[in-house]
Amino acid sequence: MFKEPWKLQTRAGAAGAPRDAGPSSPSRTAHAGSAQNSVCSRHSNGLEQFFGYIQGERGLNILDLSGASQANIGFITNLGHKLYAEDLLQTLDTAFGGGDFFLNQSSPERIERFLRHSLDFPENHFNGALVWDLLEYLSPPLLKATVDRLARIVKPRSYLLAIFHAEERAELVSTYSYRIADAGTLLLSLRGMRKPAQLFNNRAVEKLFQASESVKFFLTRDHLREVVVKR
Amino acid sequence: MPAPMPSAPPKTGEGEMPRGVAAIGKSVMIKGQLFSREDLYLDGEMEGTVEVPDNRLTIGPHGKLQAGIKAREVVVLGSINGNVEATERIDIRKDARVVGDIKTGRIIIEDGAYFKGSIDIVKGEPAKAAAPPPRPQPAPAISTPPVAAAEPNR
């Protein structure tokens, strides 16, 4: 039915839509626009922690995997840091689309090509990484390779911010664009619904980052789990 | 009186070849180095380097550059694969595509634009503060020699 069956663009009031995780948009203030295009702002403890850890520093290298946005570029560069932007979700679709999206993610050649295209950086290059919810869309072989690569390119004792859906049995989950309004506030706009490769409970997240020094969880009202990982 | 700051290029009709600037049309392909001392509109294909150090470089919607770029100001409607140094600002429009590292004083990126690379904001040196007006010096004291007493006539 869809060219990319792992993705579904939401339509307000669509009948027979599969059960999905979380509300179609976060619970806080909704700005003008349709339900699909609405931008909601909410407090983010994870974001606050992430920027709290680097407060007072300048000239850091920060990786943002949600793609380039005026909000994130402006916020991070105004802090005096250098921003590296990559739209990992778009690269994922390009690299593993065509055929079975999740099965394609088991191909070592495609994995290597994907990492070479999107995360080809020197070791210990970054002082922080904003991973957002991307890890949920990676099947186990690709997930492991990506987390390992992130661990290599982020300096020891630096932080990663990742977001996971808290509901563990959803067929489709909401994907958002994450824009930073300030050090503790996120603007979320719904990009669509998407089938996750897997959903994580706390134990699974801890296991994913078991090589890290610490993992801190923050649960939000919109059924998202914000995780700050200290490499 | 300081020279007026150049305004951002108008959005309406900017996909068309502008008048009054040096322009390279969409059917032109250049390999090599391009240097301009005036505003440049580039809507063709380019491989090499482009330098417009004191002016604006606009990459038109058909423009495809595999090039390093240095300009005072850069507006991108097409695509760039290369590093960009825009001393004042870079403006990446909605359907544009930029892959490379950017060093600039200011960046504007519209939703829908694609960018992959690093962004380093380098603010220009601030203009030296005007020297404060000299404080009025107190008038020097004037000393008058004592008037000699007049000698009596003999």
Image (cartoon, coloured by chain):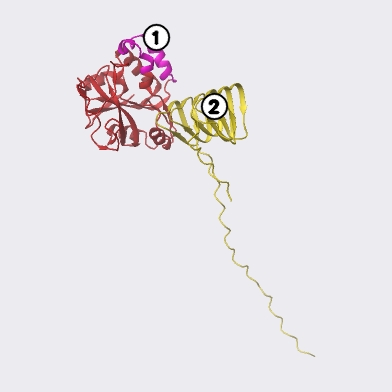
Chain colours: A red, B yellow
Subunit ID for the residue under disc 1: A
Farthest residue toward the right? B154
Image marks 2 and 1: residues in contact by CB distance under 8 Å: no
* Three-letter amino acid code of the residue under disc 1: Glu
**Distance of label 2 from label 1 (alpha carbons):** 37 Å
Q: Is residue A112 magenta?
A: yes
Residue at 71% across, 84% down: B149
Q: Position of residue B111 (x, y in %)?
A: 39, 31
Circle 2 sits on which residue? B43
Q: Does residue A209 show up?
A: no
Query: Quick one: A154 or A12, which is closer to the camera?
Result: A12
* Three-letter amino acid code of the residue under disc 2: Asp
Q: Position of residue A48 (x, y in %)?
A: 31, 35
Q: Quadrant of residue A59?
A: top left
Query: Quick one: B135 or B85, which is closer to the camera?
Result: B85
Q: Is residue B19 above or below residue A98?
A: below
Q: Quadrant of residue B152?
A: bottom right
Left or right: residue B6 compared with residue A222: right
Subunit ID for the residue under disc 2: B
Disc 2 packing (10 Å; few <14; some 14–19; many ≥20): many
* SS state under label 2: loop
Q: Is the magenta region chiefly helix, strand or loop?
A: helix
Left or right: residue B46 compared with residue A34: right
* SS state under label 1: helix
Q: Position of residue A19 (x, y in %)?
A: 19, 22
Circle 1 sits on which residue? A109
**Residue B134 has which mark?**
none
**Range shown magenta:** A93-122
Q: Is residue B128 magenta?
A: no
